[in-house]
Every structure is written in C-alpha cells, then in structure tokens.
Image (cartoon, rainbow, N blue to C red):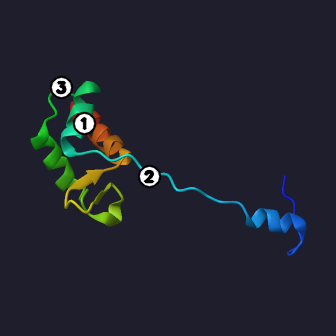
Amino acid sequence: MIEFVRAGSEAAVEIDRVVFKDRERPKYKPSQIVAVMKKRGFAWFNMNHHTTVRDLYDAKNPKNGFGVQLADNQWYYYENWIDKVAEHCAAEQR
C-alpha cells in the first residue's frame, strides 16, 4: 500500500524523523577465509589457493566490493568474498 502525505503535515514531520542505522559489516582475514573453506568441505584449500583466487578476481580492488583496507594497513574481506571463494572452490571440484 502506498500513501501520499502532504509536505509539512504532521505525518510528513514524523516521516522526517525516521533514522536509518548503518550496520558494520563483518570482516575476515585471509586465514579466516581458509578456515571457513575447510569447514565447508574444501580440505585442499590453503593460503596459496586463497592468494591465487584473490588475484584471479582482483579481490583487493575496492571497486569490486570484496573487502576493505583498514587503518592498520591490513586487508579484510567481507562475507560476499567468502561466497565468491566457495563458488570458485565448488567449480574447481567438478
């Protein structure tokens, strides 16, 4: 249902008070990615494989949205990177 409200009305003032909260996305180090892949059944996956997959998908390029470099100059990966790596590993097993 869509309801239109007149600007300046009491309802419009209430709508202006709506606040959207940002949620900090979980971040993972490469060793954690390797551990997750092993837990998902890719026992062969190791740090060398992670480096190869990282380079293949240009995962450290911020425009790809797979992670972020923080103030400690370390690169941390988001959950979407875990999904991409798992997809890659599943394709490799075929």
Secondary structure of the residue carrying tag 1 is helix
Label 3 and label 1: CA atoms lie apart by 10 Å
Secondary structure of the residue carrying tag 3 is loop
Q: Say whether marks 3 and 1 touch (CB < 8 Å).
A: no
33 left or right of 11 in image = left
- Which residue is denoted by mark 2 in the rendering? 24
- Badge 3 crowding class, 10 Å Cα cut-off, few under 14, some 14 to 19, many 20 or more, is few
33 left or right of 80 in image = left
26 left or right of 39 in image = right
Q: Is residue 94 visible?
A: no
Tell me residue 35's x, y (percent).
22, 32
Residue at point 84%, 52% (across, down): 1
Question: Tag on residue 43?
Answer: 3
Residue at point 32%, 39% (across, down): 87
Quarter of the rendering containing residue 11: bottom right
Q: Nearer the viewer, residue 91 or 65?
A: 65
- Badge 2 crowding class, 10 Å Cα cut-off, few under 14, some 14 to 19, many 20 or more, is few
Which numbered disc, 3 or 1, marks the residue closer to the eye?
3
Which of the marked residues, 2 or 1, is nearer the chain's N terminus?
2
Amino acid at dot 2: Glu
Label 2 and label 3: CA atoms lie apart by 30 Å
**Which quarter of the rendered picture does the C terminus lie within?**
top left
Q: Does 7 appear above or below 84?
A: below
Amino acid at dot 3: Ala
